[in-house]
Image: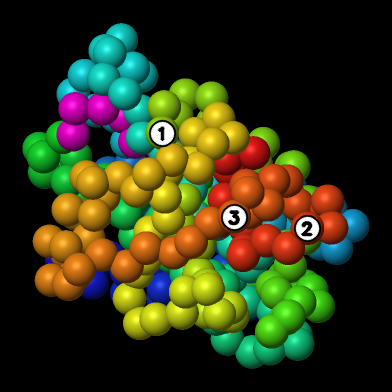
Amino acid sequence: MLLRQMLDIYDLIDKPQASGNEVADFLRAHGATDVTVERVSGERGGTDCIKVLIPGSNGKSTGGSAPTLGIVGRLGGLGARPEMIGAVSDGDGAVAALTAALKLVEMNENGDVLEGDVIVATHICPDAPTLPHEPVPFMDSPIDMQTMNRMEVDERMDAIVSIDTTKGNRVINLNGIAISPTVMQGYILSVSNDLMDVMTRVTGKMPEVFALSQQDITPYGNDLYHLNSILQPAT
């Protein structure tokens, strides 16, 4: 159960003054030993990019050989202040990623250590701009996608779980979670059986899978339609 961890993270980010340093201090207080925060600014504002490394028992950070998993919380912003008050659904990616980070940190502190390292990366922005999009406006970001990928996609990651919200589209829109086919080196592969097994155990239902097109795994800014930014780490 990660409900308590999620509520703790939500309380931290659901305010105009939400910051990466406050989240980092909270994670350190719960046992995190490797947390970095970097303030990155663009023409439309700034955001706090945060990265957490949770070392594994045989992780590469300590000289081991187990693969490293990356968890990327994709979003434009946690809020759209002053246009909208309060947290927005676009922040789900950051909330989910940071919830996973908090749980893994606490597990490590208690002696339940995964074999491989896990690197969690996202950004904290309570006042992101919006962007025109059909059928509903997109949350935009104060920094461009290339910069965001540079901050969130770490070369130490052997595989990435990218988390984003998809409430404003017609491709997949449901209560709960869904997964995409695996993407590797520009190819859309089959859906991972392991991930579908995890989904079934967690939800008690058959897996929900959303369709991808080739243009979903192309970089932003090429005037092609994208479901959202969930696949941008694949670029």
Single out the mark in the foreground, 1 or 3.
Answer: 3
Quadrant containing the C terminus is top right
> Distance of mark 1 from mark 3, alpha carbons?
20 Å
Let me know if residue 118 is in the magenta part: yes
Describe the element under mark 1 as helix, strand or loop.
strand
Pick whichever, 51 or 12, lies toward us. Answer: 51
Q: Amino acid at mark 3?
A: Ser
Residue that appears at 73% across and 80% down = 134
**Across the whole image, how many numbered discs are drawn on residues?**
3
Colour setting: rainbow
Q: Is residue 107 above or below residue 158?
A: below
Residue at horizontal 23 percent and vertical 72 percent from the top: 3
Task: Pick whichever of labels 2 and 3 is earlier in the sequence.
Answer: 3
Report helix, strand or loop for mark 2. Answer: loop
Residue 39 vs 229, above or below: the answer is: above
Label 3: which residue?
213
Residue assigned mark 1: 159
**Image location (x, y in percent) of residue 56:** 24, 28
Question: Could you say which quadrant of the image residue 11 lies in?
Answer: bottom left
| Left or right for 112, reference 225 | left
Residues drawn in magenta: 114-119
Q: In the picture provided, is 26 more to the left or to the right than 90?
A: left
Instruction: Single out the residue that lies furthest toward the right.
Output: 43
Quote the CA–CA distance across marks 2 and 1. Answer: 26 Å
Residue that numbered label 2 is attached to: 224
Rounded to the nearest angstrom, the CA distance separating label 2 from label 3 is: 11 Å
Q: Quadrant of residue 175?
A: bottom left
